[in-house]
Image (spheres, rainbow, N blue to C red):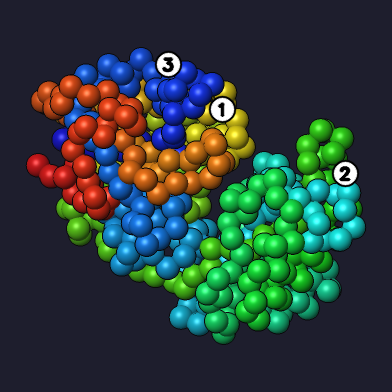
Amino acid sequence: MKYAVVISDGMADAPIEALNGKTPMEFANTPCMDSLSLKSEIGTVKNVPDTLPPGSDTAILSIFGCDPVKYYSGRSPLEAAGSGVILKENEVSFRVNMVALSEEESDFNEKIIYSHSGDNIEGEDSIALMKSLLEDEAFLNMTRELNMRFSLNPSFRHIGIAADIEVPENGFVPPHDILGSRIGTYVNAPDDKVSKIQRRIMEHAYEVLNVHPVNAKRRKEGKKAANSLWFWGAGRGIQLPDFEKNYGKQGAVITAVPLVEGIAALSGMKSIKVEGATGEINTNYAGKVCAALDALRNGADVAVVHIEAPDECSHMGDMESKIKAIELVDSEVVCPLAQGLAELGDFRLLVLPDHPTLLSTRTHDGTPVPYMLYDSTQNLSDGLKFSESDAKNGKFFAQGHMLIREFLSE
Ligand SMILES: [Zn+2]
């Protein structure tokens, strides 16, 4: 038996008036998932415990079988592991987003945060902007106060690793939670020493980045300037239980997102890099499916394919793109994956979002999500459709980390 899991990040949502009271999942044209759901077990699973912040960090720990209550220590240590950075005992890591702030106001507090991703800054542009900061003496002096070094990523997601500091108990809120807001209340809220230094760094970063040639080029292309940084998601290093030891099965993970690579690395699963996998709606879907099937052909028992696009579209508040992203998950991922799996023999396929990302609030939500569990050897149908409302009538996993156990049981 081979096993595949498709994580459609942030796919679940609430009913929307403009969609005649349907959710994007219900509205989207998804013939492949519809037909699989006729023979699948449909239910709901709570991947985010009520005591923890809703996000892919907590939710995907659950999907991989790790109880977040026990193992969650903040988002960035997981991401750091994905970039090959294993934290020492005295180290604390932070997610460092490139963000886009409004340019008109001279007072930093008055600026509006337009984008948590620097308006989708990617590749060499993002690295070039970070490098300009790392050559700036004033920037370096401030980061020295935190003994901070950086691990750069060709995306908006960089990592800062500080040494011998306290973890700020209430650091900066996730930038995707305050899109469209003036930042003053948020950058001045944390009153610990570390956050105060970081606030100065963020303001200085704006001065350096806003006038950088990369941003001049972006404005010409009609994009927003990726003109500041945002520190969040602090945490110390952790160890996760070994996936193979736990389940007696070898896992491989295909994702473009460092967080997911990190959870995989810390649980002893192999991550496979796919050229052109971006974490956006234009990702290389076929390449991801090929990589999953190759891994299964070459000894892996479980392949996890993570698709970030529905989440990113929700953060942008872009309903049409979210629907399109869900349709692409259906036609470009679930459909070819199920066909490929069938050629390999008996298989089980689990499709689920990690958490809802609501178009109405443009952020994550911790409520249970629908899952679809298909088994090629038996009809598991409970007469339900793969949608938020139908799934509520199915089986319910109150602890998200228990679902994978059931999925992988003989
Ligand atoms: Zn998200």
Which residue is identified by label 3?
Answer: 29
User: In terms of depth relative to the viewer, which is nearer, 258 or 56?
Assistant: 56
Q: Is residue 67 visible?
A: yes
At 50% across and 34% down in the image, what residue appears? 310
Q: What element carries label 1?
A: helix
Which quadrant holds the C terminus? top left
Quick check: can you spot residue 350? no
Q: Distance between the residues labelled 1 and 3?
A: 14 Å
Mark number displayed over residue 319: 1
Percent of width and height locating residue 282: 58, 29
Alpha carbon distance from label 2 to label 3:
40 Å
Residue 20 vs 79, above or below: the answer is above
Which residue appears farthest toward the bottom when viewing the image? 164
Locate residue 278, reporting x and y percent.
Answer: 56, 38
Indicate yes or no: mark 2 CB to ligand 1 under 8 Å.
no
x, y percent for residue 160:
61, 67
- Indicate the amino acid at tag 3: Asn
| Residue at x 63%, y 72% (from the top left corner) | 190
